[in-house]
Image (cartoon, rainbow, N blue to C red):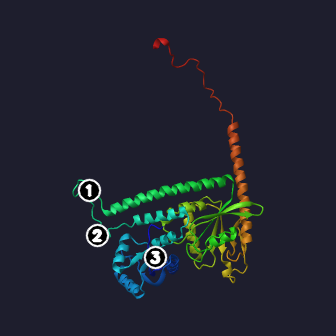
Amino acid sequence: MALYNTGVDAARAVLVGVDTGREDFADSMAELSLLADSAGSIPAASVVARKGKTDPALFIGSGKANELKRVMEEHDAELAIFNHPLSPTQQRNLERHLGRHVMDRTGLILDIFSQRAQSHIGKTQVELAQVRYRMSRLVRAWSHLERQRGGIGVRGGPGETQMELDRRMLATKAKRLENELEKLQRQQRTQRRARNRQAVFSVSLVGYTNAGKSTLFNALTKAATYAADQLFATLDTTSRRVHLDGVGSIVVSDTVGFIRELPHQLVEAFRATLDETIHADLILHVIDACSPVMKEQIAEVEAVLAEIGADEIPRIEIMNKIDLMPQTFTKGPVLVRDGQGIPKQIFLSAQSGLGLDLLRSALAECSEMTDKMRAEQNRAKQQMASDEFLAPLPERPETAEFNPIPSIIYSPNDA
């Protein structure tokens, strides 16, 4: 059960954005609409403010706030979704002004995550992110937040405010969830060490949300992982073994999708899920080759990979969905290699199966290269250990002299 219920389900919503002149503003608003739809709400209208600086009280200023209130009344909307992070004070002021619920982009993504988490570790990560989100938004919003009386027998003592009690309660809950998450991460590390002892080649699928990771995962592994044309269709990490001719079994993992301006607390909370990416032998970066903002999406994924420390892991770019634009990808499935002959990019369609044979052969090739590299590393370690064992003892310096008389002489008479 989600700890923080935002009430977004089946609500008519008005989307709000502030255009500061960024080129990707229209795409960002379109993505917000998809996020709202993925959460189960109904985007009814949009309100756009054009300002260079946001208002500290109402974020969009009183004039736009009045316009937003009128639009919400016209469309019978219960919810205003802002495409930007709001401070607790701004959210409280807007809810008072509008008389309706207000949510920012981070709250919306958290709502989707709480709906999609299925595994125990996924639910724990979502709950921890929600607790941290609530801790950052405790404001003096109600009149009952008066100081509580002091201890027993003390009249009018300073005590604690209700807000302080709430903060302490959330901090206690966050600590419990962090400990539980650490326990689950230890279990993951144990499983990963077992795979490493068996020298199993591991592959992690990453990419912008809705790029087709889960569809590709199902096509490779013959699994039945949920895949849909919506944002964050997959949240929990799923791993399956795949048999490759001439190589044997490898492990392929499907992970949570990335998105622009992914809140830092979500990246931090989902580090357990992203651990599979950090420790993979190879990353398949799945890209929607038909997206008009493909370059921006690639940059967002690369930024998150750098943040979690996975930017040095070998990767292959999977240019997916070529079947949707046959006039552009006239050559069909293609495998592109770098200057050293290593697979760098594959154009394919996970949905239709075009190019999957090229991907399988590239995975087999990378697995063989990794096995050779591991064998060389093991030989080097064994050689180093052997050299250390057989190394001659250091010679005694020529100036060293043996003194048969100890420096301290003990005699029974000294007792």
Q: Amino acid at mark 3?
A: Val
Q: Is residue 356 above or below residue 392?
A: below
Q: Tell me the distance, in whole angstroms, between the alpha carbons under discs 3 and 1.
A: 39 Å
Residue farthest right in this picture: 246
| Rendered location of residue 144, percent (x, y) | 29, 67
Q: Is residue 156 above or below residue 113?
A: above
Q: Amino acid at mark 2?
A: Ser
- Answer with the quarter of the image where residue 69 lies: bottom left
The mark nearer the N terminus, 2 or 1, is: 2
Location of mark 3 (residue): 8
Indicate the position of residue 94 as horizontal and vertical percent values: 36, 77
Q: Check residue 314 in the rendering and tell me which mark sits there, or answer none.
A: none
Q: Residue at x 63, y 53 (%)?
A: 193
Q: Quadrant of residue 120?
A: bottom right
Q: Is residue 340 visible?
A: no
Tag 2 and tag 1, C-beta contact below 8 Å: no
Q: Which residue is mark 2?
A: 143
Q: Classify 402 as above or below 355.
A: above
Dot 1 amino acid type: Gly
Nearer the observer, 131 or 71: 131
Q: Secondary structure at mark 2?
A: loop
* Label 1 residue SS: loop
Of callouts 2 and 3, the N-terminal one: 3
Q: Earlier in the sequence, mark 3 or mark 1?
A: 3
Local crowd size for mark 1, using a 10 Å CA cut-off: few (<14), some (14–19), many (≥20)? few
Vertical placement of 196 versus 43: above or below? above
Res 150 label = 1
**Which residue is located at x 69 percent, y 54 percent?**
199
How many residues crowd mark 2 within 10 Å: few (<14), some (14–19), many (20+)?
few
Residue 323: image location, x then y, percent: 68, 80
Closer to the camera in the image, 70 or 238: 238
